[in-house]
Image: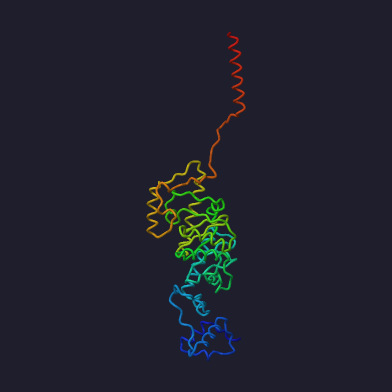
């Protein structure tokens, strides 16, 4: 059986001070290994290969050569991100925030390189090698599986919001119900969502996987870290995949609480605009965006558009039909008239 030589084999040879001329010509070379050999050959007066892998993914630097991309794709730092991506995918699936192969996750590594989940793979059963590298135009650079079609939305969000390093999109049932009804959840009810998420925005519907859909969401990410996608689902951005995922948990728990609370047969109570003002001050110090910064107290906690769809009411034990009451009144009137004439 012929020997198979990869980029790692060549780099190891060069690190030991060897020369690529010593490699067996009859061996089988991977495509990336052939690219590296071609690059070495083209270097004037040099026989060294690619430089050693950096300790961490470099920032603000494009990574285009095939050898650099493959080395980065298999680096310990990126392998750890792939494992985290798989873990978050499992949590989304276990909580029923995704079904089938729905949902997607991404994290930006460099100014023009993003790691993302593949298409047509359940988020509950992804493997690290399923993940893909894409550039900011959505062109796939690495990965055996095809990248998610909805990465275009993630990329538009990242372009519009420099703080958006990671994006999580899924379909949690209660939050998605609000997205389908195109109703914003009420505010001033639970402090955690006010600080970590805030007032929700709703992006108009467009076909999933299109740039147009991405632009509609991206138009909202300056002041909102979590967006309801009309007739579709929810998407959140943050500085990390873990934190973007947390926003999904917080939002879904809140939407579920609101739906259940609306069925208790009484008006749901809110805390005061002054208390929300306190929370917004905390939020601003944390650097979390919110469209309500700068509003007056009288402009906060406006739930005028919120209408609970269900309320519990117990009917009267023995309701009287309206027709019977009218007949009884008529009989009583005639009786009174007859008695009055007899007395006269």
Q: Position of residue 322 (x, y in %)?
A: 60, 29
Front residue of this view, candidates 237 and 24: 237
Res. 31 image quadrant: bottom right
Q: Which residue is located at x 46 percent, y 86 percent?
A: 15
Task: Name which quarter of the figure residue 336 lies in.
Answer: top right
Q: Looking at the picture, does residue 197 appear above or below residue 49?
A: above
Residue visible at 62% across and 27% down? 323
Q: Residue lying farthest top?
A: 344
Q: Reply above or below: 182 against 156.
A: above
For the image shown, how many numbered marks are present on the structure? 0
Q: Position of residue 120 (x, y in %)?
A: 60, 66
Q: Residue at x 37, y 58 (%)?
A: 285
Location of residue 145 with respect to 92 vertically, above or below: below
Is residue 206 or residue 257 the one in the foreground? 206
- Relative image position of residue 7 (x, y in whole percent): 52, 82
Image coordinates of residue 86 in percent, x first then y, are 52, 67
Give the colouring mode of the picture.
Answer: rainbow
> Is 5 above or below relative to 241?
below
275 or 78: nearer the eye? 275
Quarter holding the C terminus?
top right
The quarter in which the N terminus is drawn is: bottom right
């Amino acid at each position: 059986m012929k020997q198979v030589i990869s980029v790692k084999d060549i780099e190891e040879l060069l690190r030991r001070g060897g020369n690529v001329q010593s490699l067996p010509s009859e061996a089988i070379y991977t495509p990336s290994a052939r690219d590296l050999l071609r690059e070495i050959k083209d270097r004037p007066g040099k026989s060294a290969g690619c430089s050693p892998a950096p300790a961490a993914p470099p920032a603000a630097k494009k990574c285009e050569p095939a050898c650099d991309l493959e080395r980065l794709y298999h680096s310990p730092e990126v392998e750890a991100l792939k494992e985290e991506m798989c873990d978050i995918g499992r949590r989304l699936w276990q909580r029923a925030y995704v079904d089938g192969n729905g949902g997607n996750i991404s994290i930006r590594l460099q100014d023009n390189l993003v790691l993302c989940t593949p298409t047509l793979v359940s988020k509950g059963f992804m493997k690290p090698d399923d993940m893909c590298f894409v550039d900011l135009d959505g062109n796939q650079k690495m990965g055996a599986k095809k990248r998610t079609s909805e990465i275009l939305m993630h990329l538009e969000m990242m372009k519009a919001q420099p703080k958006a390093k990671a994006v999580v999109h899924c379909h949690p049932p209660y939050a998605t119900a609000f997205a389908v009804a195109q109703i914003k959840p009420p505010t001033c009810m639970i402090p955690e969502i006010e600080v970590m998420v805030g007032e929700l925005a709703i992006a108009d519907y467009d076909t999933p996987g299109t740039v147009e859909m991405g632009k509609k969401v991206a138009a909202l990410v300056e002041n909102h870290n979590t967006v309801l996608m009309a007739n579709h689902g929810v998407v959140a951005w943050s500085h990390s995949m873990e934190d973007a995922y947390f926003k999904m948990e917080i939002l879904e728990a809140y939407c579920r609480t609101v739906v259940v609370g609306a069925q208790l047969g009484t008006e749901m109570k809110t805390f005061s605009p002054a208390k929300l003002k306190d929370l917004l001050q905390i939020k601003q110090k944390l650097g979390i965006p919110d469209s309500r910064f700068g509003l007056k107290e009288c402009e906060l906690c406006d739930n005028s558009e919120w209408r609970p769809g269900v309320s519990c009411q117990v009917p009267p034990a023995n309701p009287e039909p309206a027709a019977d009451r009218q007949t009884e009144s008529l009989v009583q009137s005639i009786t009174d008239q007859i008695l009055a004439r007899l007395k006269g």
